[in-house]
Image (tube, rainbow, N blue to C red):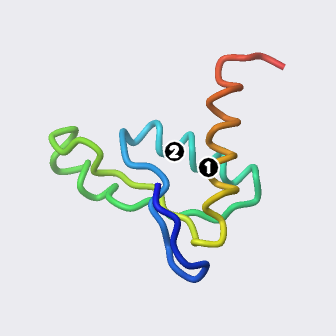
Amino acid sequence: MTTQGEHDVVRVYAGPVVTVELYQQALKDAGIESKVVGLDLTGGLGSALSNSVELWVKGEDVERAAAAIKRYEDDKGVMA
């Protein structure tokens, strides 16, 4: 993850569709707007392109996004 200017968009994750969707939900729950890029590639090529699906956020949200993803990873599998 590379920190950019606050008006840039930054890729915070690239990987399997399922993981991207889980992380996007974690960001949404944290109030962070995100964009998934590359879904159209998976339809025609399946998993032939590893890390072809990406999750992007505004530069100003990079640190909060990283924290939200880490929280999700730390809590994964833990039932409340």
The residue wearing badge 1 is: 66
Horizontal and vertical percent position of residue 43: 24, 49
| Nearer to me, 10 or 29 | 10
Residue with the most extreme right position: 80
Q: Are marks 2 and 1 in contact (CB under 8 Å)?
A: no
Horizontal and vertical percent position of residue 24: 58, 50
Count of residue discs:
2
Residue sitting at 62 percent across and 42 percent down? 69
Q: Amino acid at mark 2?
A: Glu
On screen, residue 20 versus residue 53, left or right, reads right
Residue sitting at 44 percent across and 37 percent down? 18
Residue sitting at 57 percent across and 63 percent down? 34
Residue with the most extreme bottom position: 7
Q: Check disc 2 and report its element: helix, strand or loop.
A: helix
Picture quadrant of residue 22: top right
Q: How far apart, in angstroms, are the residues tagged by discs 2 and 1?
A: 15 Å
Mark 2 burial class by Cα count in 10 Å: few <14, some 14-19, many 20+: some
Q: Check disc 1 and report its element: helix, strand or loop.
A: helix
Between circles 2 and 1, the one closer to the viewer is 1
Q: Which mark is residue 17?
A: none
Picture quadrant of residue 80: top right
Horizontal and vertical percent position of residue 8: 51, 79
Does 78 sit above or below residue 10? above
Q: Amino acid at mark 1?
A: Ala
Mark 1 burial class by Cα count in 10 Å: few <14, some 14-19, many 20+: some
The residue wearing badge 2 is: 21
Does 24 sit above or below residue 50? below
| Nearer to me, 36 or 71 | 71
On screen, residue 48 versus residue 1, left or right, reads left
Horizontal and vertical percent position of residue 73: 62, 30
